[in-house]
Amino acid sequence: MSVTPIGAMSDAALQAAPVAKARGYWATVGRRIARDKVSMICAFILLLIFLSALVAPWLGLADPYQGSMIRRLRHIGTAGYPLGTDELGRDMLARLIYGGRLSLIIGISPVLLAFCIGTSLGLVAGYVGGKVNTAIMRTVDVFYAFPSVLLAIAISGALGAGIVNSIVSLTIVFVPQITRVAESVTTGVRNMDFVEAARASGAGGFTIMRVHMLGNVLGPIFVYATGLISVSMILAAGLSFLGLGTKPPEPEWGLMLNTLRTAIYVNPWVAALPGAMIFAVSICFNLVSDGMRSAMDIRN
Amino acid sequence: MSATIPKTAVMPDMLEPIEDRGGAAQPLLQVNGLTKHFPVRGGLFGARKTVRAVDDVSFSILKGETVGIVGESGCGKSTTARLLMHLMNRDAGEIIYDGMQVGRALSLRELRRGMQMVFQDSYASLNPRLTIEESIAFGPKVHGVADAVARTVARELLGKVGLRPENFANRYPHEISGGQRQRVNIARALALSPRLVILDEAVSALDKSVEAQVLNLLADLKREFGLTYLFISHDLNVVRYISDRVLVMYLGEVVELGPVEQVWDAPAHPYTRALLAAMPSSDPDRRTETPPISGDPPNPIDPPSGCRFHTRCPFAEPLCANATPKLTALDTMGHQAACYMAVPGSGHSRALSKS
């Protein structure tokens, strides 16, 4: 060890800062996830499905509602019907792409809504603590005690069939789960010294939650919520399957799976297609969320 | 501002420090009977017990001085700091800032401008999602300073703590070293123009050479901004180096206080003597061969009766277990100790007979 008199420190040593350009947290996460091949492929597939659903009317597809009694249950690869036809003779390719519109909306919007509600509830419960925490968390636990499928069916059944009602019921299913994650992450961050320092500077609870807590809890909650999208898609498909979600002739993957069920012995490949779409989208969301989880796990 | 306190070189954009009202003779901080007990439950159906973390602590800090608090871990040093900062509620006691009772004459919000704190863990005390500039500018913004002005102040303060703003302002905490981070924390504490800064083990986590630089920085800043420090540490050498007066705490109580020379040269409480004897000497002829103190501190849930140190004190007598000694003045310099041996005529065999 060199003997340096107290205080005699070279300016260069003190000013030594990393050479790399300063990058924000999210920029670093973005760079890390861009290097993850699996996540990028999955993200690309999701993007493809999203875009095709979005621009479906301009893709020159057949009418998804136009059936034909003489062209029912054609096989995959039939001329004019690349993915065959369903039990009413409607073009499967068109129905799958149009079906993405509804399926993605009722799969993603409950998670998005539950993310907003659950994060707010969990943040308040975790930051304020005490009686507020008990009140919020025990209420949430009541909902959490029901199996999610059962709860979704019960609420949907009570509200009646329909797209909006199934979104509402799925939101109610996911709020408790996200709230619990948000609360536990918040409790961990709340006890850190920088929150104490913010309190010591005289900031109010709302300002501290907005400036200091939100940025530090959002990441883990976001990852968890992304993982829920696949669950939501499957539950939404399940509701449609039971006749509680969308109604025929609306193209929607879960409903299509339900109606094609009768044709499974006649044309199993075509009957499996909507299920394959649900599978592809949910596994892609799961893998992207896994990739994000590891990309966000940055140690200093 | 009072004429007795020199107006210090405060940067133009900074918040005005809160006004000096009491004058030079008024202690900047007076603490009377500060008490904090934490309830703990022994098991599911066990009886409720209390940890006496801070018990009837009283002291004062004069304007412009540095007061050190020393003691083993768990003796209530950090709890005292958090109580002073009002980061937790006290059970009893009053805190008087420059003659104004906090909560009555002085609002909590004003107090926070007048008193700031630097924490031990330099990494945990900075928000990892904010740049250094944003972290420092946060305090002034809370107190109504415009964003652009607060950022200018932050950059100027970075310069004051020895970090070039152009290199550091847009950095994130994980990109800089521990010593640099602690400088940022000091700048953050200064951003509200406080007059009292509580340094809670602020240099303890730094390695020795960096620690020395930060201590010198603290001395420079004290001169430049006319600060008063409350310096909490377990490192006796550091406390001696920086403090004017020192407070020795044991199990939530003050056992000895006084000017640092008096306490070091003539420690009156056996615990202080043990603490000082436990400091390793660099002279091989003066090895520590007998342990200065034996055993662990007793559980603060059930502190010993009487003098809390009597279970480990080599001079303990029945008297010590029965009654609690009060802080007693030993001289006219403000040196006080809570020990029956220091009280003439107390009945302890080593105490001077009453003259």
Image (spheres, coloured by chain):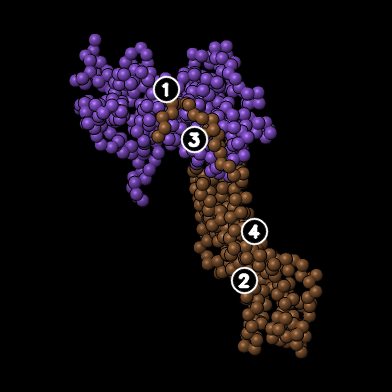
Rendered residue at 25%/26% (across/down)? B286
Please check whether the numbered discs 3 and 4 fall on a single chain.
no
First in sequence: mark 1 or mark 3? 3
Rendered residue at 41%/29% (across/down)? A3
| Chain that bears disc 4 | A
Residue B120 lies, with reference to residue A267, above or below; the image says above
In three-dimensional space, the C-alpha distance between marks 1 and 3, rounded to whole angstroms, equals: 21 Å
Q: Amino acid at mark 3?
A: Gly
First in sequence: mark 4 or mark 2? 4
> Marks 4 and 2: CB-CB under 8 Å?
no
Image quarter in which the N terminus of chain B is found: top right
Depth check: A150 or A252 in front? A252
Q: Which residue is mark 1?
A: B243
Please check whether the numbered discs 1 and 2 fall on a single chain.
no
Classify mark 4: helix, strand or loop: helix
In three-dimensional space, the C-alpha distance between marks 3 and 4, rounded to whole angstroms, equals: 42 Å
Residue that extends furthest to the front in the rendered view of this protein? A2
In three-dimensional space, the C-alpha distance between marks 4 and 1, rounded to whole angstroms, equals: 56 Å
| Chain that bears disc 3 | B
> Residue A19, position in %: x, y?
58, 42
Q: A248 left or right of B330?
A: right
